[in-house]
Image (cartoon, rainbow, N blue to C red):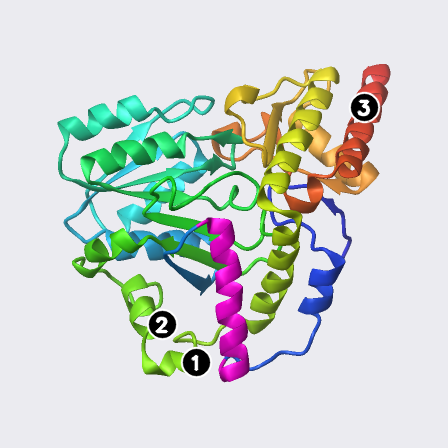
Amino acid sequence: MQTYDLMIPGPVELAPEVLDTLGSQVIAHYGPEFTRFYRETIDLLKRIFQTAGDLFPIVGSGSAGLEAAISSVIGRNDEFLVLSNGYFGERIAEIGQAYTSKVNKLNFPLTEQVSPKVLQEAMEKNRNVKAVGVVHCETSTGLLNPVAQLAEVCKEKGVLIMVDAIASLGGVELPMDEWEIDICVAASQKCLESPPGLAFVGVSKDTWPVLEATASSGWYLNLKRAKEYATSLAAVRHPTSTTMATPLVCALRTALEGILAEGLETRFARHRHMAELLREGLSEHGFELLIPPAIASPTVVAAKGRKDLGADLLVKLLRGDYQIQIGGGIGELEGKIFRIGNMGPNAQQERIVHLLEAIKRLVREHTVSK
């Protein structure tokens, strides 16, 4: 199968050392050696979540993590408020609708942040909301929502906040405990620089009384059950209740060690600087940015196509002529924008410059041909 320079908004390409680890022989998912390795890996991941709470890996995509969070918190008669300004905000609402008919949405324009003031006003009108769901980095647009301020509102109202950090954790500052986030969901394949296939759900210590009182659905994605097993005698030698994807855990461990060796503050600064370089280059080549830089995520950069070089055509030409794969628009932005993942290994100057040089040549060639 043809391979490309992968600059989509996840998955990312893997570092050589992560590939080497992934290529090792499969090991057992139980026993003292793996149990110790597994627990050490979770402790490393907690440093990136910046939490002292519980953290549960789930074999599945990020959406499995979201479903585990929602199904464990929201009972059939509970009200779930979703703040949506993009495709993946809508995804949270869709998952919620599988567990309760009482899903309400506050919809915001695609290019505007979710408003803490509007959230506060909504919860003053409706005091029955049990939890609020929101996306940190809306992958469909590259917008970064003000999670810290939203969490303040939720804490003031005594309502849980559930954050989708799938496209931001590891590339953007998101201190779970400091910001008093109740549940935080991430995945392996984006800024954590690991293979697809693992979701992670962080649960704060203060959230457990609410979860324990919830008549949650399901078995495999049930966080209460995961907690019960993790603290059982069986977990001493068998750290998860089902077969864990041990190659993915091993690859994750290698990636986490690299992330922490770089240092979180250094890493966050690198992502910001490379996003600025990318946005400046796109603007110079005549592409209008979708999201104003002040509210844009460092991990996903989105821009509109030019009149003479549309978004889909740019995606096609980069892939065909330069073997660089970027993302197109999804949902109502399909065909209107293109999206570039500035995550992990992509947030490097040589990668950004190489991409911008290819775009520059395409702009020149296509303009001349017209």
Residue matched to label 3? 360
Q: Which residue is drawn at 35% across and 57% down?
A: 68
Residue matched to label 2? 230
Classed neighbour count for the residue bearing mark 2: other residues with Cα under 10 Å, few (<14), some (14–19), many (≥20): some
Report the amino acid beneath label 3.
Answer: Lys
Residue matched to label 1? 238
Label 1 vs 3, first from the N-terminus: 1
Q: Nearer the viewer, mark 3 or mark 2?
A: 2
Q: Nearer the viewer, residue 177 or 338?
A: 177
Q: Does the magenta stretch include residue 33?
A: yes
Classed neighbour count for the residue bearing mark 3: other residues with Cα under 10 Å, few (<14), some (14–19), many (≥20): some
Q: Which residue is drawn at 62% across and 47% down?
A: 263
Left or right for 140, reference 312: left
* Residue 79, visible in the rendered structure: yes
Q: Which of marks 1 and 3 is in front?
A: 1
Q: Does the magenta stretch include residue 120?
A: no
Q: Distance between the residues labelled 3 and 2?
A: 53 Å
What number of labels is visible?
Answer: 3
Which circle marks residue 292 in the picture?
A: none
Q: What x and y, as percent, mark residue 169? A: 51, 45
Q: How far apart are marks 2 and 1 (CA)?
A: 9 Å
Question: Which region of the structure is painted magenta?
Answer: 30-50
For mark 3, give the secondary structure.
helix
Left or right for 83, reference 168: left
Report the amino acid beneath label 1.
Answer: His
For mark 2, give the secondary structure.
helix
Residue 136: quadrant of the picture: top left
